[in-house]
Image: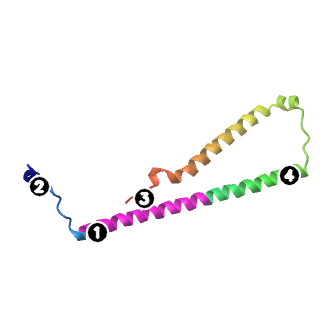
Amino acid sequence: MENEIREFFRQTAPKPADPTSFTLELNARLAAVEQIKAYHDREVRRARRTFLLVFVAGLVLGGALAAFLILRPVRMPDTVTAMESPWFWPVAIAGTLLVLSGSILLSRRLSAPFSASRAPRA
């Protein structure tokens, strides 16, 4: 029984691969890994630049709005008369839709770099 098992393992033992083909395949895989790392690094840099741009724009616009409100006090209108204006509700609805659609478009654009369709091909 023991001899049969040894003979079976000798017959089914994997053949050693050609060392040159192994080296070529290993180098190809290492090159693919390096390409993926470079792509990932580019995307991380791009996301950081986008975040920094949006952050600075928010600071500038927020500071400008704060300065405007501090330097020019606003007299609050009577809410009843403002809501009776024929332009109040159309402007309010249009402004809400504009903010919502802008935030959806911006979130889709910022998440696009990480989608699978833009991944590098090996």
Camera-nearest label, 3 or 2: 2
Q: Which mark is residue 120?
A: 3
Residue occupying the point 61% across, 48% down: 106
Task: Give the residue type at disc 4.
Answer: Phe
As rendered, which of 84 and 80 lies closer to the eye?
Answer: 80
Residue with the mark numbered 1 = 24
Residue 20, image quadrant: bottom left
Q: Which residue is mark 4?
A: 68
Which quadrant holds residue 82? top right
Q: CA distance from mark 3 to mark 2?
A: 47 Å
Q: Residue furthest bottom?
A: 20
The residue to which callout 2 is attached is 6
Front in this rendered view, residue 80 or 45: 45
Amino acid type shown at disc 2: Arg
Nearer-N-terminus badge (2/1): 2
Q: Classify mark 1: helix, strand or loop.
A: helix
Residue contact at pointers 2 and 1, CB within 8 angstroms: no
* First of labels 3, 1 by sequence position: 1
Q: Main secondary structure of the magenta part?
A: helix
Tag 4 or tag 1, which sits nearer the N-term? 1
Mark 2: give few (<14), some (14-19) or many (20+) Cα within 10 Å: few
Distance from disc 2 to disc 4, alpha carbons, whole Å, reads: 89 Å
Residue 113 point in image, percent of width and height: 52, 54
